[in-house]
Amino acid sequence: MDWTAVKHQFKQSWLTTVLSLILFSGVTYFLIWAEGKTIESNLMLEELVSAAESIDVHTGDDSARYEGRVVHIVGPLRVMEPISEPDYNIHVQAVKLRKRVQMYQWIEETTEQANFLSEPAEESQKTYWYHKDWRDYVVDSALFYIRPGHHNPTSIPMFSETHIAESVKVGWLHLGLDVKRKVNDYYEIWSDSRPERSDIKLHSGFYYHGESALQHNIGDLRIHFSYAGREDDIPYSPQYFPTADPISLFRKGSYSLKQLFELEKHAANIHTWKYRLLGFVQFSKFNGFQAV
């Protein structure tokens, strides 16, 4: 064996070899971690379902009897007090009320066009143009290519937020915060009830902070609301520990314990295949990196 040739080849490719090993190790670790999380999740789900007991929470209050045990219940939500945004005259009997805040700002767009008459080493020609639109975040106009005449505020005076009802029940059983957070079936609120504040304008379900609801200036705010888990919606099927345990399952609709288990298992399998596909993509990148 010609060790001189081997050393020469190693000197030329040692960086590629090291990076390939790091990438291969990272992808392998990720796949092992993903499979381990899948097994752990399935075991936890099976243990949860096997220990669960379907109970009727619409007769006598028997909460003390089931304290610390896994229960499966079905029933409509009862929100004890509505969530309110008094400035906008919004009151909704729901588990969640989401407030989305957007600001009217300058937006920079670019188009890139290759210059076929120039030398290959030269960059392609970029064209910049600007328009105004609503955004949930601050667009930093200091990074614009053409800054004069395109200035945005550096902050939004109010933020998007989600309110969660304090007391929510299914029958006599109070739902914990971990369960309420899983209520995510949002529906938009298209209210025609005008707010009392004169500085807030209502138009087509949107609330505007500005001089006009039809003609907007940079820095104007637009507010829109949506709710999740309204009291008069269809029944829900939660399964969880009555105590403050992070393990809980929650589905909209009337499901038996077996149906709930199958739905959660199917959802877990979908997540598993997402991880696997991501791992396969990384492996293909690794093979392509080796071929370079």
Image (spheres, helix red, strand yellow):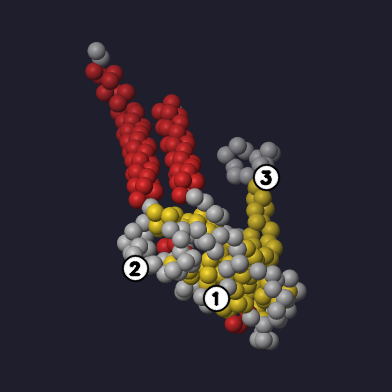
How packed is label 1: few (under 14 Cα within 10 Å), some, or many (20 or more)?
A: many
Query: Is there CB contact under 8 Å for labels 3 and 1?
Result: no
Is residue 112 among what the camera can see?
Answer: yes
Seen in the picture, residue 139 relative to 250 is either above or below; the reply is: below
Image check: 13 left or right of 207?
left
Find disc 3 in the rendering and name its residue. Answer: 113
Instruction: Describe the element under mark 2 as helix, strand or loop.
Output: loop
Q: Earlier in the sequence, mark 3 or mark 1?
A: 1
| Image depth: mark 1 or mark 2 in front | 2
> In this rendering, would 252 be left or right of 195?
left
Where does label 2 land, which residue?
64
Instruction: List the single residue furthest toward the top.
Output: 1
The quarter in which the C terminus is drawn is top left
Identify the mark at residue 103; answer none if there is no mark.
none
Res 118 quadrant in image: top right
**Residue drawn 45% across the image and 33% down it:** 280
Q: Quadrant of the N terminus?
A: top left
CB contact under 8 Å: marks 1 and 2:
no
Read off the residue under disc 1. Answer: 83
Q: Is residue 213 above or below residue 247?
A: below
Q: Residue furthest right?
A: 214
In space, the residues marked 3 and 1 are separated at their CA atoms by 52 Å
